[in-house]
Image: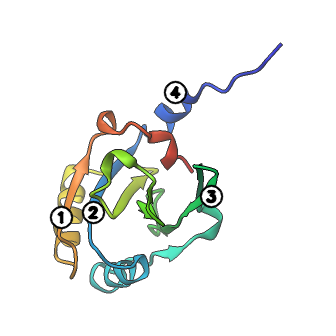
């Protein structure tokens, strides 16, 4: 008997309580996270254990992830690099430099509005918008 992983169920469960934002900011990830931490009072840190590795064209590509756990609740924020060495974590969104995923606890609409407005004020951020899960073809690339 051959066992098969039900990836669709895994994807659905992972995205059950998430909010995903796309960010255009043509800067290095550490520069963006420094500004986020300074301006928004977050404490994003690079988490090398979460780094995503994709194999394309017989090469390995590594996408770094920064993480911030909100004190006193289950909400965790992740900041993904969307590109590495000419390849993209989500190829359908090549125009996006970063992906911001909030997971673990349902975010209220006013919290999301505050988050969007705060990110827009960060130097070098040209665009930030909420993304709906239905438009993402390669959702499995975001699963941690």
Sequence-first disc among 2 and 3: 2
Q: Residues within 10 Å of mark 3 (few under 14, many from 20)?
A: few
**Residue under circle 2?**
23
- What residue is drawn where x is 42% and y is 62%? 83
Q: The N terminus appears in which quarter of the rendering?
A: top right
Please tell me whether residue 85 is drawn above or below residue 74 in the rendered image: below
Please tell me whether residue 6 is drawn above or below residue 36 in the rendered image: above
Check disc 3 and report its element: helix, strand or loop.
strand
The picture quadrant where one finds residue 88 is bottom left
- What residue is drawn where x is 62% and y is 69%? 48
- What residue is drawn where x is 53% and y is 46%? 143
Q: Which mark is residue 60?
A: 3
Image position of 5 (left or right of 111): right
**Residue under circle 4?**
8
Is disc 2 in contact with disc 1, using a CB cutoff of under 8 Å? Answer: yes
Sequence-first disc among 2 and 1: 2
Check disc 2 and report its element: helix, strand or loop.
strand
């Amino acid at each position: 008997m051959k066992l098969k992983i039900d990836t669709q169920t895994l994807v659905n469960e992972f995205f059950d309580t998430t909010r995903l934002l796309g960010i255009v900011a043509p800067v290095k990830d550490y520069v963006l996270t420094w500004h986020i931490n300074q301006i928004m009072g977050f404490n994003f840190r690079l988490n090398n254990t979460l780094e995503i590795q994709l194999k394309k064209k017989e090469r390995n590509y590594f996408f770094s992830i920064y993480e911030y756990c909100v004190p006193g609740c289950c909400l965790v924020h992740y900041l993904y690099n969307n590109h590495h060495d000419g390849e993209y974590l989500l190829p359908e969104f090549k125009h996006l430099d970063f992906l911001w995923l909030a997971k673990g606890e349902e975010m209220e609409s006013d919290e999301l509005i505050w988050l969007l407005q705060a990110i827009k004020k960060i130097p070098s951020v040209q665009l930030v918008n909420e993304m709906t899960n239905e438009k993402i073809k390669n959702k499995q690339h975001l699963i941690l």
